[in-house]
Amino acid sequence: MSFQIHALPAEPFHQLFAMSDEKLRALNARRMTVGAKPGSPCRVSLADAEVGETVILVHYEHQPAASPYRAGHAIFVREGVAQARLAVDEVPEVLRSRLISSRQFDEEGMMIGADVVDGESLSAAIDTAFANARTSYIHLHNAKPGCFAARVTRA
């Protein structure tokens, strides 16, 4: 079954890079310099930031569904990058290189399944999740730090 992995749009994060560190702290966000690669996966470009690059660590509500599973977590975004536009069935390196938690949701935002999979096996795990007709969408998280990584829909 074909799927589409979606990066976050860049526009909602542009203004963060123009803010002072004091204003960022008031939003519970932080400007950081990347010290290691991998380590700061950008949710807009769906690529790891380079050593020395500036990123913003900010809270993002990735599950706004009106359900008990409404959720948010910290994410990294890079300055000046375009939103990744992946091909159908494409799994980017930033996901293939990590241990990934997959959480399947129905149309009402209720979790109906979950799995943890090596990123190299992610494509097969997504296919298996979408074999369940009740699966409306999937959220991918980095399993070790637990941060939201991307949303997946049927293509």
Image: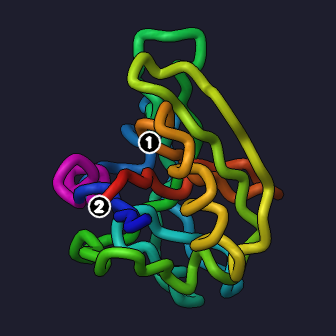
- Find numbered disc 1 in the image and state the secondary structure of the residue it sits on: strand
The residue sitting at 82% across, 57% down in the picture is: 144
Which region shows up in magenta? 10-17
Q: Is residue 34 above or below residue 148?
A: below
Q: Is residue 42 above or below residue 16?
A: below
Q: Which residue is mark 1?
A: 137
**What's the amino acid at mark 2?**
Ala
Give the image location of residue 5, x and y in percent: 39, 64
Nearer to me, 153 or 59? 153
Q: How many marks?
A: 2
Residue 100 in the figure: left or right of residue 92: right
Majority secondary structure of the magenta segment? helix
**What's the amino acid at mark 1?**
Tyr
Identify the image quadrant of the C terminus: bottom left
Marked residue nearer the N-terminal end (2 or 1): 1
Give the image location of residue 149, x and y in percent: 54, 57
Nearer to me, 23 or 149? 149
Give the image location of residue 140, x and y in percent: 58, 53
Residue 132 in the figure: left or right of residue 145: left
Give the image location of residue 29, x and y in percent: 49, 43
Q: Which residue is mark 2?
A: 155
